[in-house]
Image: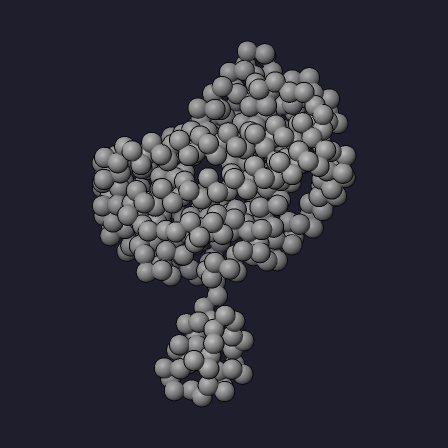
């Protein structure tokens, strides 16, 4: 994953140089405000997952979740699997804390459904404005259609898990068979097992049963996600002000929604390249000079994507998902190995081995 991170960094090095040049041309006070807005964005984003996990009776602290949200972005970028990598990160963390991975995945699904639903409301306004100004292009319609389809798919999975678990069971078995066909074609030895599905669906159903009754918590989750989107739009507004460019609210929203759509449905990890192009083309179609549109888009993406990606790269080791050194130490002690041998064999961090 570290290697893939540096590959992405190397491939986009020219864009990052352009980002540095564009920031130098801006008003740094408003760039700082945009960065500050992103900090509050991640605070609110963390609270959305905290609420979602609370809905499925998973206890998570803000302190634990905050670095995980940054690591979530990093994992989804270097291991692009349609968001499944980030979900697996949360599930792995839950497993290490002796919590249910299935309930955790249910919480992630609820969070994603709420996120896509609230964004869909804002997307409607942006698409309608582009349509009213006759600037809605075919590629934007296709991307919006894919986004709506993905949202409906997640909602369908959620509904099946609550009301028709047997149907979800059939779907997951079919999905497993399809994946195994691909592994066979690619001549991979590893096969996907289906012995977990029935038990997993039952647990998912149990975790989801009481969600619809918790209307107050659901209201909090949806409100928090609307706040997340508003903060993101505010951050984009600060970038416009930093370059002394006047922009209407409608143009701001339309450019924002197109950027998010291509970030989600784009074929590149986190929409690298596609998001920048979609936002720039949307802004230029609304009369913003191409050069300014490029500078604003690159700066905004630097603040909302590249900076969190770097932070996620740094924090990934802090969440202790892959490091099992502490378990290895315990095992060695239980095997009556000498303490001096343990010191030589393992580089111990944050543990007083003498104790």
Is 153 rendered above or below residue 187? above
Is 58 rendered above or below residue 41? below
Q: Residue furthest front?
A: 29
**Residue 94 in sight here:** yes
Q: Is 316 in front, or is 84?
A: 316
Q: How is the image coloured?
A: one colour
Q: Is 136 in front, or is 138?
A: 136
Image quadrant in which the C terminus is located: bottom left
Is 9 rendered above or below residue 162? below
Q: Quadrant of residue 28?
A: top right
Q: Residue at x 57, y 54 (%)?
A: 313
Residue 96 point in image, percent of width and height: 38, 61
Q: Quadrant of residue 49?
A: top left
Q: Residue at x 42, y 49 (%)?
A: 62
Residue 129 point in image, percent of width and height: 54, 15
Image quadrant in which the N terminus is located: bottom right
Taking the image as shown, residue 248 lies to the left or right of residue 166, namely: right
Count of numbered badges drawn on the protein:
0
Residue 198 point in image, percent of width and height: 24, 50
**Residue 285 in sight here:** no
Taking the image as shown, residue 149 lies to the left or right of residue 266, namely: left
Residue 333 point in image, percent of width and height: 40, 82
Q: Quadrant of residue 252?
A: top right
Q: Residue at x 32, y 34 (%)?
A: 218
């Amino acid at each position: 994953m570290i290697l893939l991170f540096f590959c992405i960094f190397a491939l986009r090095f020219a864009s990052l140089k352009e980002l540095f040049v564009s920031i130098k041309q801006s008003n740094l006070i408003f760039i700082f405000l945009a960065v500050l807005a992103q900090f509050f964005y991640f605070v609110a984003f963390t609270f959305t997952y905290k609420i979602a996990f609370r809905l499925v009776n998973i206890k998570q602290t803000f302190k634990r979740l905050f670095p995980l949200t940054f690591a979530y972005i990093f994992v989804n970028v270097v291991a692009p699997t349609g968001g499944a990598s980030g979900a697996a990160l949360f599930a792995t963390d839950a497993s290490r804390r002796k919590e249910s991975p299935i309930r955790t995945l249910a919480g992630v699904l609820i969070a994603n459904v709420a996120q896509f639903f609230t964004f869909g409301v804002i997307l409607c306004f942006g698409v309608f404005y582009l349509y009213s100004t006759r600037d809605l292009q075919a590629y934007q319609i296709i991307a919006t259609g894919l986004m709506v389809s993905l949202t409906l798919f997640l909602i369908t999975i959620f509904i099946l898990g609550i009301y028709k678990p047997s149907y979800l069971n059939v779907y997951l078995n079919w999905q497993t068979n399809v994946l195994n066909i691909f592994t066979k074609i690619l001549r991979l030895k590893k096969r996907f097992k289906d012995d977990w599905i029935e038990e997993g669906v039952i647990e998912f159903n149990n975790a989801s049963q009481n969600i619809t009754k918790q209307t107050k918590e659901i209201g909090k989750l949806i409100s928090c996600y609307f706040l997340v989107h508003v903060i993101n739009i505010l951050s984009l507004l600060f970038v416009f002000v930093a370059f002394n460019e006047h922009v209407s609210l409608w143009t701001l929203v339309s450019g924002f929604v197109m950027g998010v759509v291509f970030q989600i449905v784009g074929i590149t990890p986190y929409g690298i390249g596609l998001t920048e192009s979609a936002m720039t083309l949307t802004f230029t179609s609304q009369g913003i000079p191409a050069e300014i549109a490029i500078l604003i888009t690159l700066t905004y993406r630097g603040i909302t994507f590249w900076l969190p990606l770097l932070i996620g790269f740094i924090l990934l080791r802090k969440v202790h998902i892959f490091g099992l050194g502490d378990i290895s130490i315990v095992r060695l002690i239980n095997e009556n190995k000498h303490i001096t041998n343990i010191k030589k064999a393992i580089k111990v961090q944050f543990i007083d081995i003498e104790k």
